[in-house]
Image (cartoon, rainbow, N blue to C red):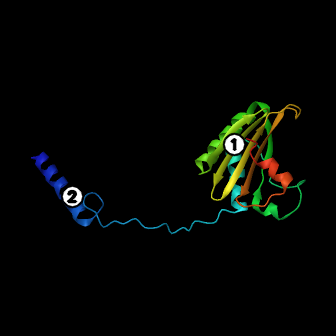
Amino acid sequence: MRTRGTAAAAAAVAGFMTMTGCGIVGDSEAVPTASPVPILPYTKETATAEIVSLARAGGLPDGDTSASGLPKGDWQKCVAPWMGEAPATEAAGAFDATVMRLRQHDWEIVSSHAEKDVTYRTLAKRGWKLFARHYTMKGFGPDQIVSLTAVEDGCDLPGQIRGDYEDPA
């Protein structure tokens, strides 16, 4: 008797949910709506904040986001530089982990290769290219240099700067 009562109650609840449109069965009127949050433009400030955050999450120490020591000009408005030094024993792993995190945040690999003492990764996202470099050259002491520089598409870079960011291959 107890089984019949339980089965009857379950059937009544299932019938009620179907009739009320709770999304269990036959709820064909549910229409997905657009997100109320607008997609914001991807700016230099957005790129810089993302690079800084993902570099730290990847295990890299704090880096320099200034363009100090570089030629002045309007080109700096469309470039988001980051450069830091990491202990040689951790630099390669932190570089790879940072690139992985960038990819997890919609940066797509455009090119990837190594040449002599430099590992190159170029990624793209929302009208920007990110030039990631890991330098393993001797002579910097116990640290190795990592550079993560985002450049907005169409940015008019001076010749001497363009050579630093473009892929050599």
x then y, percent, for residue 1: 9, 47
Q: Which residue is mark 1?
A: 121
Secondary element under disc 2, as helix, strand or loop, is helix
Q: Is residue 128 visible?
A: yes
Q: In which quarter of the view is residue 19 placed?
A: bottom left
* Amino acid type at mark 2: Val
Residue at the location (78% across, 32% down)? 116
Residue at the location (56% across, 68% down)? 38
x then y, percent, for residue 32: 40, 65
Q: Which residue is mark 2?
A: 13
x then y, percent, for residue 35: 49, 66
Which of these two is toward me, 4 or 92?
92
Mark 2 in CB contact with mark 1 (< 8 angstroms): no
Tell me the crowding category of disc 2: few under 14, some 14 to 19, or many 20 or more residues within 10 angstroms, Cα based: few
Residue at the location (69% across, 34% down)? 93
Tell me the crowding category of disc 1: few under 14, some 14 to 19, or many 20 or more residues within 10 angstroms, Cα based: many
Looking at the image, residue 25 sits to the left or right of residue 114; the answer is: left
Residue lying furthest left: 1
Secondary element under disc 1, as helix, strand or loop, is strand
x then y, percent, for residue 77: 78, 63
- Point out the tag, 2 or 1, that comes first from the N-terminus: 2
**Separation (CA) of disc 2 from disc 1:** 57 Å
Q: Quadrant of the C terminus?
A: top right
Q: Which mark is residue 7?
A: none
